[in-house]
Amino acid sequence: MVGRTPALFLFQLAMAFAMSLAAAGLTAAPEAGDTFPTRVLWGDTHLHTRLSIDANMFGNSRLGPAEAYRFARGEAVTANSGQRASLARPLDFLAVTDHGEFLGLIPGVQDNAPELQGFELTRQWKTALADGDMATLMQLWSKGPERVGDTVFAGPQFMGRIWRDYAAVADRYNVPGQFTTFIAYEWTGMAGMDNLHRNVLFADDAKTVTAMLPFTSRDSQDPGELWRYLEAYETSTGGRAAAIPHNSNLSGGRMFLDRTASGEPIDRDYAQRRARWEPIVEITQIKGDSETHPLLSPGDKFADFGRWDTNLAMNDTVRPSMSQYPFNYVRSALGIGLQIEREVGTNPFRFGVVGSTDSHTALSTADDDNFWGKFSKDEPHSGRAVEPVLPLSVSGAEGIYPNHRLLASGMAAVWARANTREAIFDALLRREVYATTGPRITVRFFAGWGFVAQDAKGDIAAVGYDKGVPMGGNLDSAPNAGAPRFLLSALRDPEGANLDRVQVIKGWVDAAGQRRERVFDVLLSGGRKPAADGEVPAVGNTVDIAKATYSNSIGTAELQGWWQDPDFDAAVPAYYYLRVLEIPTPGWALYDAARFGSAPSPSAQLSVQQRAYTSAIWYTPD
């Protein structure tokens, strides 16, 4: 955060910590008698450092995993632009997910790694890097490693050493109870320019994880082969691992396809394996929001958020097709999962959701007023909002990667009893997690058959766990003819904006096999009530464009209540999740304009309604 004195920073840090605990009704550690998660932990499961080849090529030549962990836990670091950067509120956990493909290649070439000497390909890389020859670097990156005996850059000599060092750094910064690090990497599957990437997280220590080298897209572009690798890892080491699909909005209609990678229909075995190895997906990040799209949810007036509408994949030549859209977005995928379950008996898309950044600067920042860009060349400076994220020679067309389309998103929120690898990984597996687009909004969500209105008074956690299931859970058939009942609670970020509303998103499959959805405005600030046609008056907008400020004179700090599904059919499977909306606040491009005394980009979104998405709760009839 530029311009903060050390004393002010420490004071704000202490106040933020105290406020967040007090506002959320939490203590610094779980109460001894509690048998359920009492802490929401904040982190990032998607971050790149100088060891990722693209991060290094586009400006991050200095900051590696150690600097990323230091920054995330609250220390100030010097960014590649020379600016000092710090977080006013440290993270609780971090997974550095450098690309497995070519992991550590550029530093290895520049540092004359002994395993890489004597190869023509190494000489070509070294020459192109020294000359700053971007065209040659791109060609070398895309054509893959030359094979001389073992693969030069991905073999056990070089890759094994880099992987062991990488894991050792994660272990060194892991402090159980205070700050959790996960050994992780990104499997960068790209079918053409369709983004099928997964972040691979391990719950284990370096000794266990490094028993196997990372499985990369150079080994296979088929996610099913990645799952076989994860299974082999668990079988051979006794450890635990999972994959997190990300950025589905740019997957070219492939991420949640109702077919396998080879084009075969999804069968029960495939559905079970996908649900087993991909319990979580990333719903929001820097390259846009993947909840839904206005074409998929025309009745949802908040569906138009953070969308990259001119391209369906990561290439400007891939234009949107309506038939492909459902396979790009999380909400429609939840419905597709219900359709597949009707056919094969297992839902492959019974996943929870997190948000994360996908920053390549090694700086995990998700606040609009402290946004450090996608790549290091885009760290804060005047005019960056109108610049392309990648050089046009790389992106292929002007406009595909303009900075103004980037979000400062997102954050992963985890309900866990302890800040440890084991406890956080347990929460990921049981899907008791949620996403925000940056703010630290505290959200609870429970479903059950026996809740009553009085249960929504006070702390809903104890009764929620006692009489129902939390986010990520499954609600079995009703013991009677009644509809399911829900307890919901949202508390604003103690340093952020008031809340506008809490919505329940319901999805189901009708008798004709068609996906259906409905958005319920359940809790509203300011005493507002839906009109006869169901429309809710807007909360208002206090954003001052000239000053890049807003006021909490509208909205409310907390929304909590009880809700029952008015359209319930006990014979129909369904999913429910919460979307919590803040009042409008300035976007990062507006903060930039005020900071640098420039006019805001005319294409940028100057005020935004930040939000949280919970993992779903499913209803499954017997």
Image: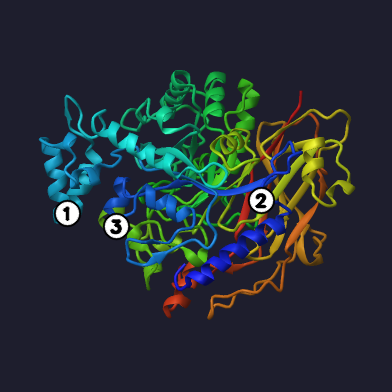
Between tags 2 and 3, which lies in front? 2
Whether residue 436 is visible here, answered yes or no, is yes
Front one among 32 and 556? 32
Hey, which quadrant is residue 445 in on the image? top right
Between tags 1 and 2, which lies in front? 2
Question: Which mark identifies residue 28?
Answer: 2
**Is tag 3's residue or tag 1's residue first in the polypeptide sequence?**
3
Answer with left or right where residue 529 lies relative to residue 578. Answer: right
Residue with the mark numbered 3: 59
Answer with left or right where residue 295 lies relative to residue 77. Answer: right
Image location of residue 409, percent across then percent down: 51, 55
- The residue lying at 43 percent from left, 27 percent from top is 208
Residue with the mark numbered 1: 133
Label 1 residue SS: loop
Image location of residue 112, percent across then percent down: 16, 43
Question: Which mark identifies residue 333?
Answer: none
Q: Residues within 10 Å of mark 1 (few under 14, many from 20)?
A: few
